[in-house]
Image (cartoon, helix red, strand yellow):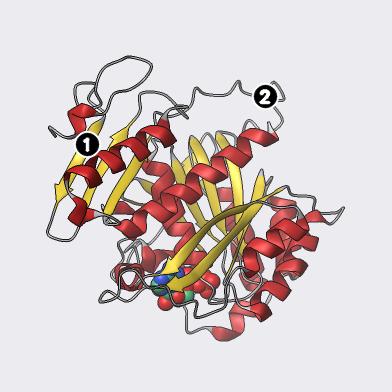
Amino acid sequence: MNVLRGVIHPESGENVVDLGMIENLHVSDDKISLTLAFARHRDPMAASLKKNIESALVTAYPQYAGKIAIFLKEAAPKPKPQPTDQTHSTSNLAEVKNIIAISSAKGGVGKSTVTANLAVALSHMNYRVGVLDADLYGPSQPTLFGLEDYSPVGEKIDGEERIIPGESIGIKLMSIGFFIDASDALIWRGPMATNALRQMIRQTQWGALDFLLVDLPPGTGDIHLTLVSDLPFTGAVIVSTPQKIALADVVRGIKMFRNDKIHVPILGLIENMSWFTPAELPDHRYYIFGRGGARDLAAKEGIKLLGEIPLIQSVREASDEGRPIANEASPAAAYYEDVAGNMIHQLDKLL
Ligand code: ADP
């Protein structure tokens, strides 16, 4: 804390400790982590203060170089004026500000893991967040949030049948997995699954949310057309690994969102499993699935690369245990916070 008192916020002239900006400071043998809290949304000093704190700590404690995790927490943005159009006032999505599609061209690239952790990162920034798990072929959000045993209940609200979502670490969750037994393979591909999905989309009682992240099924199929016609998406995010065959399919995903009938703005591409760093060789990066492919593709297609998330064992372990890693002060969490910040930046540009 004494070291941090040497870091001054340039606007106020006071140090970050006395300004009450330092939260959750943890020091262990192998890392220092802390949360840097801002009283306003998108403080222009955020990036430079984060850098100054990091260099002050490394100067005082060189043994922690590369082992410092700083999370940014921002105050929620001022509410946007509500649209005057009242046609959706009775809809279950009336108070949902941004609906974001999280998609991937291929299965297994980490789309669901990214969705869950991005939701947590946004919630740490004081946004109200919900997750709609529409991945018919592998609904994994109940597991990721430790809500496998949740059974949604129905309720009549203002004369409408509504379904109450589950809730874990402040995030509301509705999943197609709550309605259809995973072993019922036949139902998954037929109209019953689509009907269940539609019912879930129309009846979930979300209440007021800043973000609803929708975990889409992988690929580009009819089900996506259904989803896009039923949900007024604000924007879409595409997740891929750097592998050539995964990236080739990403182009199809980009085309789908740009298609005249769909026309959802693409906020950017997230590269997952970008590299692997073994614990015993912290300065090494192994580019298991290839290197730089997503960055090149994003540049070629004119979309933003929102972040590169390495392959981290604790991400997989925490996922299996039903606790998204972004909820813990860990170096892994910082990657999701970065992606969340970049996504919000892209959203701001849309307005
Ligand atoms: P998808 O939704 O694209 O099918 P998942 O999110 O289910 O993919 O992820 C596939 C597997 O990869 C899961 O076992 C998950 O825990 C793991 N995984 C995803 N991202 C990472 C990561 N950054 N580091 C380590 N494991 C990851």
**For discs 2 and 1, the disc positioned in front in the rendered view:** 1
Picture coordinates of residue 343 (x, y %)?
56, 45
Q: Nearer the viewer, residue 75 or 96?
A: 75
- Crowding at dot 2, Cα within 10 Å, few <14 / some 14-19 / many 20+, comes out as few
For the question of whether residue 175 can be seen, the reply is yes
Left or right: where 127 falls relative to 147? right
For the question of whether residue 91 can be seen, the reply is no
Q: Is residue 196 above or below residue 14?
A: below
Picture coordinates of residue 91 (x, y %)?
62, 38
Q: Is residue 210 above or below residue 146?
A: above
x 21%, y 28%: residue: 6
Res. 23 mark: 1
Res. 83 mark: 2
Picture coordinates of residue 228 (x, y %)?
72, 54
Q: Quadrant of the C terminus?
A: top right
x 87%, y 53%: residue: 260
Left or right: where 200 falls relative to 38? right
Disc 1 secondary structure class:
strand
Kind of residue at disc 2? Pro
Q: Residue furthest top?
A: 12
Picture coordinates of residue 320 (x, y %)?
32, 73
x 56%, y 85%: residue: 185
Kind of residue at disc 1? Glu
Res. 8 mark: none
Q: Nearer the viewer, residue 155 or 211?
A: 211
Mark 2–mark 1 Cα distance, whole angstroms, equals 37 Å
Regarding ligand 1, which quadrant of the image does it lie in?
bottom left
- Return the disc, 2 or 1, that comes first in the chain's sequence: 1
